[in-house]
């Protein structure tokens, strides 16, 4: 099964969120960068057609409401 462009974009958004969180955790100055800026900067060009605020909101909401535990 091949991932759709929207699914690939959601994965890229999630990855950018991880980069942002990691930078914040490590004390890097992110004062002038929002998570949206980081997402837009890190999405590959071929996925930008699927990028929308609705998709970003969906990914943010899903990850915020999902409680994952490492085993």
Image (cartoon, grey):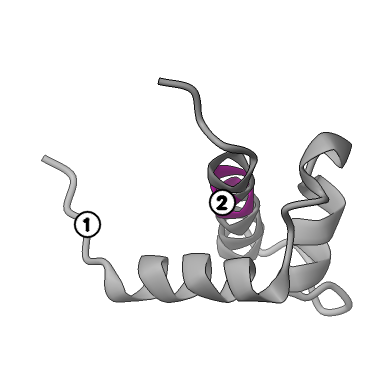
The answer to which quarter of the image holds residue 21 is bottom right
Give me the residue at 75% from left, 71% from top: 36
Q: Name the spot of residue 68 as percent of width and height, x first.
A: 22, 57
Q: Is residue 14 magenta?
A: yes
**Labels 1 and 2 touching (C-beta < 8 A):** no
Closer to us: mark 1 or mark 2? 2
Circle 1 packing at 10 Å, graded few (<14), some (14-19), many (20+), is few
Q: Which residues are magenta?
A: 10-15
Q: Position of residue 30 (x, y in %)?
A: 78, 70
Who's the residue at 82% across and 49% down the image?
48
Label 2: state its secondary structure: helix
The C terminus: image quadrant = top left
11 on left or right of 20: left
Residue beneath the point at 50% across and 65% down: 59
Name the residue: 83% across, 67% down: 37
Q: What is the CA distance from the residue labelled 1 to the residue labelled 2?
A: 18 Å
Most common secondary structure along the magenta stretch: helix
Place of residue 61 in the rendered image (x, y in percent of width and height, measured from the top left): 43, 76
Task: Tell me how many marks there are.
Answer: 2
Q: Residue furthest top?
A: 1
Of residue 9 and residue 19, the one placed in the foreground of this image is 9
The question of residue 71 being in magenta is answered with no
- Outermost residue to the left: 71
Residue receiving disc 1: 68
Q: Nearest the camera: 41 or 2?
A: 2
* Residue identifier under label 2: 10
The quarter of the image holding the N terminus is top left
Q: Quadrant of residue 64?
A: bottom left
- Under circle 1, the secondary element is loop
Position of residue 55 in the picture relative to residue 33 (left or right): left
Q: Position of residue 4 (x, y in %)?
A: 56, 36
């Amino acid at each position: 099964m091949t991932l759709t462009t929207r699914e690939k974009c959601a994965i890229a958004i999630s990855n950018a969120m991880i980069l942002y969180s990691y930078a914040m955790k490590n004390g890097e100055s992110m004062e002038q960068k929002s998570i949206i800026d980081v997402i837009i900067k890190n999405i590959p060009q071929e996925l930008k057609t699927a990028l929308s605020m609705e998709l970003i909101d969906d990914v943010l909401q899903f990850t915020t409401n999902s409680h994952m535990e490492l085993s």
